[in-house]
Amino acid sequence: MANKILVYIDHFAGQVVPASWEAVGVGTSLAEKLGSEVVAVVLGHEVETFAQNAIEFGAGGVLMGDAPELKDYRPEPFARVLSQLAAEAEVLLLPTTSRTRELAGMVAVDLETGVMPDVVAFEIEDGSVLATRPIYAGKLLTKVICPEKRPQIFTLRSRAFVKPEPDPGRSGDITRIELDLGEIVTEVTGYSESMVGVSLSDAAIIVSGGRGVSNNPRLSPPTEITDEGEQEIWRAQQGFALVSDLAKVLGAAMGASRAAVDAGYVPYEHQVGQTGKVVSPDLYIACGISGAIQHLAGMRTSKTIVAINRDSDAPIFKLARFGIVGDLFDILPPLTQAFKERLG
Ligand SMILES: Cc1cc2nc3c(=O)[nH]c(=O)nc-3n(C[C@H](O)[C@H](O)[C@H](O)COP(=O)(O)OP(=O)(O)OC[C@H]3O[C@@H](n4cnc5c(N)ncnc54)[C@H](O)[C@@H]3O)c2cc1C
């Protein structure tokens, strides 16, 4: 196992997180430079297809831990098995997700090494991997290295790297590993729908709404809604319906600012930013979002940013490639209609 590059394949609700394949691609290019081999790690239940997919995306081999106890992700057994596998590895790569953030940390504690999270670029320096990662809410990039401890553990920012083309003709060894799971003290009792519905991190297009989405004094709530707070929520629902219509036409995911989430307009799963999801889509459309630094921290690496805001001085316009100054309630319906006509 020594000198191996392990790539952890993260999956949830029967779907592999696509950034796992980006991690396999990174592993392959690091392996070429370090003269080592890329081995994917697939843990779960009935995950043979994922193991096969890992080979198709470029892994030289797969270590597969398949057991009913691993059907649902839980940190204790997953970290235990991954620590055993990574103990002799040179590098461990994981896509950045909420699961792998804790998994990488727990493996690092087990193996007395460090974690370099949310990496956006890699180089090799003196036989070690030099990683570039954003700091200070994405305002600066820093280069970090772990020169002595092994394995070097990295989580990779989603969509920061190219996903390799799968080759269905590739072959490689899939090794079923003997599992030592220890005592598992937690049990997953179920999932709520909102947790599986939104996949902001992988979306190529995101349409996001902020506090401005509730701001349409021309809309009169039904007379039975008399409470001011409820009136605001009602207005926000009308506004988010416009955001969601545009998202549907574009095949996009729907995001939100923290102000919109804190006000109860949409659930937390939609939040983009420092304390929400970090996203990097090809197109990010911000509607009624001012562009606070904590929001920008989550979306500044989007390839093209479009901002719709009625305040021409809103900070979001400094980052946006295209800006539309105006009321989103006037702009979104014809914009959605125009996309509908174009895209069919
Ligand atoms: C520790 C910490 C962590 C945070 N984490 C996050 C985070 O993860 N994500 C995040 O988003 N924020 C985060 N914040 C909050 C952040 O500082 C801002 O308060 C928040 O981003 C503001 O959201 P907003 O842009 O929707 O609201 P506002 O700043 O109120 O902006 C609303 C915008 O809508 C425009 N507008 C109003 N009406 C209309 C209309 N009808 N048509 C068009 N435009 C209109 C206004 O001109 C304004 O620019 C965090 C703050 C702290 C302190």
Image (spheres, rainbow, N blue to C red):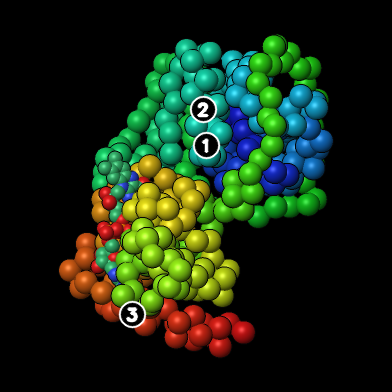
Question: Within 10 angstroms of label 3, few (less than 14), some, or many (20 or more) residues?
Answer: few
Query: CB atoms at circles 2 and 1 under 8 Å apart?
Result: yes
Which residue is found at the position 40% from the left and 23% from the top?
146
Q: Which mark is residue 218?
A: 3
Which residue is found at the position 61% from the left and 53% from the top?
197
Label 1 amino acid?
A: Ser
Question: Within 10 angstroms of label 1, few (less than 14), some, or many (20 or more) residues?
Answer: few
Q: Is mark 3 within 8 Å of ligand 1?
A: no
- Name above or below for residue 125 compared with residue 273: above
As helix, strand or loop, the secondary structure at mark 2 comes to helix
Camera-side mark, 3 or 2: 3
Residue 37 seen from this side: no
Residue at image mark 1: 98
Which residue is found at the position 79% from the left and 42% from the top?
49
x and y percent of residue 76 in the render? 62, 19
Q: CA distance from mark 3 to mark 2?
A: 47 Å
Q: Which mark is residue 102?
A: 2
- Extreme-left residue of the structure: 313
